Image (cartoon, helix red, strand yellow):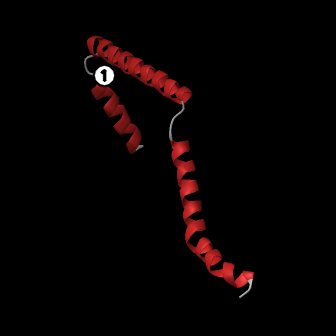
Amino acid sequence: MDLFQMLLVPMILFMVIVAPTWIVMHYRSLNQSSRSLTEEDRQSLEAMLVAVDQLVDRIESLESILEADHPNWRQQQDRKANEEKEV
């Protein structure tokens, strides 16, 4: 039995079982590492969430001012929107 015949079965087993498993695990670990946020990303996301909260507060303030000055402003806006849809 020569060297090629002795290594044939281990090479086939490596190519059929070990190599595909190794490749799948490698790319799965790359995918998981790319999914996690960096510290800079977390800080940026936190800053955006704070900005969103501030904008929500501003919108609520503006709506309360509009309600005080023009009590039916929402109904008027709804009517205008419906008229524009019909045209």
Residue kind at label 1, given as amino acid type:
Trp
Who is closer to the viewer here, 20 or 35?
Answer: 20
The secondary element bearing badge 1 is classed as helix
**Could you tell me which residue is drawn at 71 percent across and 88 percent down?**
1
Tell me if residue 39 comes above or below residue 20 in the rendering.
above
User: In this image, 25 relative to 3: left or right?
Assistant: left
Q: How crowded is the residue under tag 1: few (<14 C-alpha within 10 Å), some, or many (20+)?
A: some
Residue placed furthest toward the front: 1
Specify the quadrant of the image occupied by residue 26.
bottom right
Please give the residue where the numbered disc 1 appears in the rendered image. Answer: 73
Who is closer to the viewer here, 87 or 40?
Answer: 40
**Measured from the top left, where is residue 31 in percent x and y?**
54, 49
**Could you tell me which residue is drawn at 35 percent across and 17 percent down?**
57
**Measured from the top left, where is residue 61 in percent x and y?**
33, 14
**Could you tell me which residue is drawn at 51 percent across and 35 percent down?**
37
Q: What is the number of callouts on the image? A: 1
**Measured from the top left, where is residue 24 in percent x and y?**
55, 60
Q: Quadrant of the C terminus?
A: top left
Tell me if residue 36 comes above or below residue 72 in the rendering.
below
